[in-house]
Image: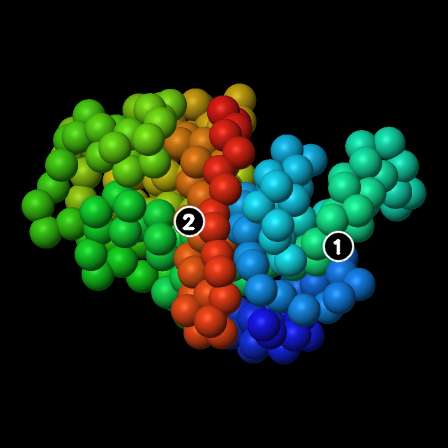
Amino acid sequence: MTRLAELEAYCNDLLKVTEFTDYCPNGVQVESESKEVHRIVSGVTASLALIEQAAELEADLLLVHHGWFWRNEPAPLTGMKGRRLRALLASDIAMMAYHLPLDAHETLGNNRRLGERLGFTDHRPLKEGALVWQVELERPITPEELAERIHRGVERAPLHLPGGPREIRRIAWCSGGAQGELVNAAELGFDAFISGEVSENSTHFAAEMGIHYYAAGHHATERYGAAALGGHLAERFGLSHRFVDVDNPV
């Protein structure tokens, strides 16, 4: 058993939470009555489906990447938000969420783990603490080979918007909804950029700026950080942990 406050303090320090200006609060978002943790269930998004599965697994803590209380969203805990909260409280489950700090972490973060899933080695952030990561391959690959590598890595076929060279060596990526970084990647001379989502203008940016873009799914590219953090906490504090993947095609 570990106190909820101890886990939060440890995670806040580990993930360097104070170094980020985020769109939502990081750390404990909902406190349990017991404030003690034996079992952790981790997942990507704090949806009702994930909460219900955490309750079935008798979790004390739900650890997610996408929590609640996003900037500019309506504040009242009514409707959908009310149902989610009541489900947590009814099972006395605390909820802890880490967004950008979990994307960026150098060993447990979504971008580190996504690079590993894609079979990259020597991958690193563009600069210390950056959300965008990069790799330079020893042997160039074709656009089709990169698409297949992404398909195998995240178990979903990416949407490929062609525009770059036939040989890909320099690749950048950022998990989630980071299609806006496509222009920056092109300006930095990368051959390909990978993220989760796509916008209408992404097609034109890729074609006109000479870069390949692969949209591999917001959920699919962010399944790895919360699972890694949950496993790390379980090992360090002697807790039980299980990652639950509530599938999302987006």
Residue type, label 2: Tyr
Q: How is the image coloured?
A: rainbow
Q: Which residue is mark 2?
A: 224
Going 56% across and 59% down the picture, which residue do you hit?
Answer: 39
- Spatial distance from mark 2 to mark 1, Cα to Cα? 26 Å
**Residue, disc 1:** 92
Mark seen at residue 120:
none
| Relative to 8, residue 216 above or below | above
| Dot 2 crowding, Cα within 10 Å, few <14, some 14–19, many 20+ | many
| Residue in front for this viewpoint, 132 or 101 | 101
CB contact under 8 Å: marks 2 and 1: no
Which residue is at 35% across, 53% downward? 113
| Mark 1, secondary structure of its residue | loop
- Residue type beneath disc 1: Asp
Residue 87, quarter of picture: top right
Judge the density around disc 1: few (<14), some (14-19), many (≥20) Cα neighbours within 10 Å: many
Q: Position of residue 209 (x, y in %)?
A: 36, 33
User: In what quadrant of the picture does the N terminus appear?
Assistant: bottom right
**244 left or right of 61?**
left
Q: Residue at x 75, y 66 (%)?
A: 34
Q: Is residue 166 above or below residue 135?
A: above
Q: Please state which of residues 134 and 175 is positioned toward the viewer in this rendering.
A: 175
Location of residue 73 (image quadrant): top right
Residue 76 in sight in this render:
yes
Name the spot of residue 55 as percent of width and height, x first: 65, 44
Nearer-N-terminus badge (2/1): 1
Observer-side mark, 2 or 1, equals 1
Indicate left or right for 213 with 45 as reference. left
Q: Position of residue 129 (x, y in %)?
A: 46, 67
- Tell me the SS state at disc 2: loop
Q: 94 above or below 180?
A: below
Rendered residue at 46%/71% (across/down) = 238
